[in-house]
Amino acid sequence: MYIPILIVRLLGISLALLFLAVLIILINMIPKRIKRKNVLIGNSQKKGDRKIQEDSFSTFETDNGVIAILADGMGGLERGKIASDTTVKMFIEEFTKEYELYDVQKFLINSAYTANDKIVNIANGRKIGTTLIAAIIRDKKLYWISVGDSRIYLFRKGELIKLNEEHTYERELNKLYEHGKISRNEIKGHPQKEFLTSYIGYEEFCELDYSKAPIQLSRGDKIILMSDGIYKSISEYEIKEILKKRHNPDKKCELITDKVEKKNINNQDNMTVVLVESK
Amino acid sequence: MSLKRCTNGHLYNPKKHGQCPYCDESELDKGVKENKKEAPVRKHMTVSNTHDNGAKTKAFWNESEGVEPAVGWIVCIEGPERGRDYKLKSDKNFIGRSEEMHIHIQGDTFISRRNHAVICYNPKQRNFMLIPGEGTGIIYANEEAIYSPTELSSYDVIEMGKSKFIFMALCGEHFEWEA
C-alpha cells in the first residue's frame, strides 16, 4: 500500500508546482495588459506660404516607450520632403523593430548616423538634407537628439526651457563675439547667420546635440518639438500662453499653428509642432 | 476628443477629417519622379571662413536658397552693395532694406525698408515685370522713370535709391522649370 500513496503525494506536489508556475506566468502578463497610457500626444502641421510641405513628423508608442520625431527637409523641388520623410520613417521603423531597447541614447545617436548615410546616398552629390529632433520617453525619462535648427522644449510649471542648441552659423558668430572678434551689430546683420552648420544628409556630418543625461519627467511636464517655421514667427511668450491653457495637447498644437498663420508673415515657412504631455 | 493615429504616426480628429490630413502621398510620389529626371549633379556648397586664430568656421546650408528654384537675378553694379547678386524666385519678389524682404538690400538708405519695388515672374506668361512699390524715391529702368508695371528684359539696368542693378533672366523663352 506504500506505492500508491507515494504516487498520489508526488502527483499532488507536481500539480501544485504546475499551478504555481501558471499563476506566476499570469501575474507577469497582467501588468502589460492593463498598462495605463503614460502620455498624451498632440500634433499640428501647416504649409504656410510654401507650395510644398517639406516638414515631416511622427509619434509611436510601443513597450519600449514613446517616440516623437520631427524633421524639416531642405533641397527645393520636393527633395526636402524626401529627406525628412525618409529620416522619420527610418527612425520609426528601427524603433518599432527593437524587441527590447537597452541603451536609448545610443539607439538615437546611432540611428542619426544611419539616417545620415541613407540621405547622403539618396542625394548622390546633390544638396538634400533635413533637420532632426527625435525624443524617446521611457519610464518617465526623456532622451533626445537634435541636428539642425528645429527645437525641443520642456514646459514645466509655467516655464518654457529650450533643451537643444541649434546648429546655425549664428552660434559660431556668438563665439567670435565672446572672444571680442566681432560686434553684436555684425552678428545681427550677418547674411549667413541662419545657415546650418550641421544637418542630416551632410557628407561630413558629425555635429549632433543630445541629452547628456535623461531628464526625469513629472506629471504635467510637456515636451514640445517644433520646426523653425513656428519659433521664427511667434515668440516663446506666445507659445507659453497657449501651453498654459486648459486644452488637450492636440488643441494646443492647433492653436499654435493658428497663431503663426494669423501673423501673415511674408513667405511663411512650413510649420510643425508635436506635443507630448507626461501624465 | 478621441484622436486617431494614421499608419505614418500622425494624430488627427476622425470627426473633422475623413483621412489623415497630414499624409500627402501624391506629393511624395511626384517628388520621387522628379528625382529620377534630374539635371546633372550640383557641387556641394560650403562657405568657409578662416578667422584670426586660424580655426575654420563653417556655414553649410542657406535655408532660403534651397527652397525655391531661381528664375533670374539682379546684380548690383553701383552702390553700397556693388558686386552682390540677388536671386529671384517665381511670383513676387519684394525688394527693400528690411531683412524680411525677399531681396534684402543693405546699406542704401534711399531704398525703403519695405516694398520699395517688386519684381514679379509670371510662370504662365514667362515674363518679368518690375512694379514700383511704396517708396518715396522714383525707380528707373534703363534711365526711364517707372510709375506702373513694366516688363523687364535681360541686361536692363534698374536704378533704386543710390544703387543700380542689372537684371538677368533665367526663365522665359529658352528655359522653364518643369512643374
Image (cartoon, rainbow, N blue to C red):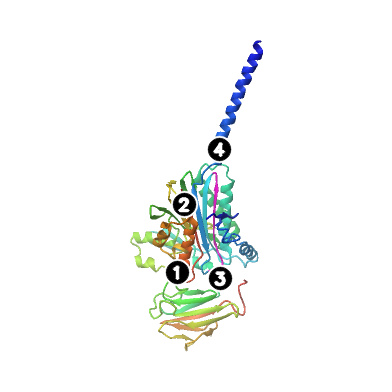
**A5 or B167, which lies in front?**
A5
For label 3, the residue is B69
Looking at the picture, does residue A28 appear above or below residue B39?
A: above
Q: Residue at x 52, y 61 (%)?
A: A45
For label 2, the residue is A277
First to last magenta residue range: A50-63
Chain ID at mark 1: A
- Say few, some or many: other residues with alpha carbon within 10 Å of mark 4 (under 14 / 14 to 19 / 20 or more): few
Q: Distance between the residues labelled 2 and 3?
A: 39 Å
Chain ID at mark 3: B
Classify residue A159 by image quadrant: bottom left
| Same chain check for tags 1 and 2 | yes
The x and y percentages for residue B1 are 52, 55
Observer-side mark, 1 or 4, equals 4
Q: Residue furthest top?
A: A1
> Could you tell whether A178 is left or right of A208 in the image?
left
Element at label 2: strand
The x and y percentages for residue A223 are 45, 53
Is A55 one of the magenta-colored residues?
A: yes
For label 1, the residue is A263
- Say few, some or many: other residues with alpha carbon within 10 Å of mark 3 (under 14 / 14 to 19 / 20 or more): some
Residue type marked 1:
Lys
